[in-house]
Amino acid sequence: MKLVYFAWVRERIGRPEEELTPPAAVVTVADLVTWLRERGAEYTYAFEDPGVVRAAIDRVHVKPGAPIAGAREIAFFPPMTGG
């Protein structure tokens, strides 16, 4: 699946996107974040407070418990403000 990173998440990880195949045990967005944090210091830094980073599956905002099966793209980004 394609993972896309925006704003400071991208800056901390050091790349805008990547293709990854998570293990079968990774079934939700929260599982994916946990798995990513184990991939290296840059991911640990980007997801140091997983409750802050938002996610979208195939361009639809989702909660951490959302299943990732069948997802083509998962995006991670910080909270947004408007005004």
Image (tube, grey):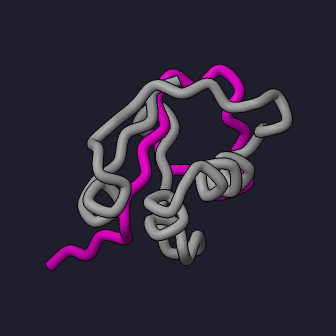
Check the image and report above or below for 38 versus 53. above
Position of residue 31 measured from the top left corner of the image (x, y, whole percent): 74, 50
Which residue: 62% across, 24% down?
Answer: 21
Position of residue 64 measured from the top left corner of the image (x, y, whole percent): 66, 57
Which residue: 43% across, 52% down?
Answer: 76
Check the image and report above or below for 61 versus 69. below
Which residue: 37% across, 39% down?
Answer: 4
Q: Nearer the viewer, residue 47 or 52?
A: 47
**In the rendered structure, does residue 40 fall within the stretch colored magenta?**
no
Please state the extent of the stretch shown in magenta in the rendering. Answer: 60-83
Check the image and report above or below for 16 versus 34. above
**In the rendered structure, does residue 79 fall within the stretch colored magenta?**
yes
> In the image, is 71 to the left or to the right of 23?
left
Judged from this view, the residue extending furthest toward the right is 25
Position of residue 55 measured from the top left corner of the image (x, y, whole percent): 49, 52
Q: Nearer the viewer, residue 45 or 49?
A: 45
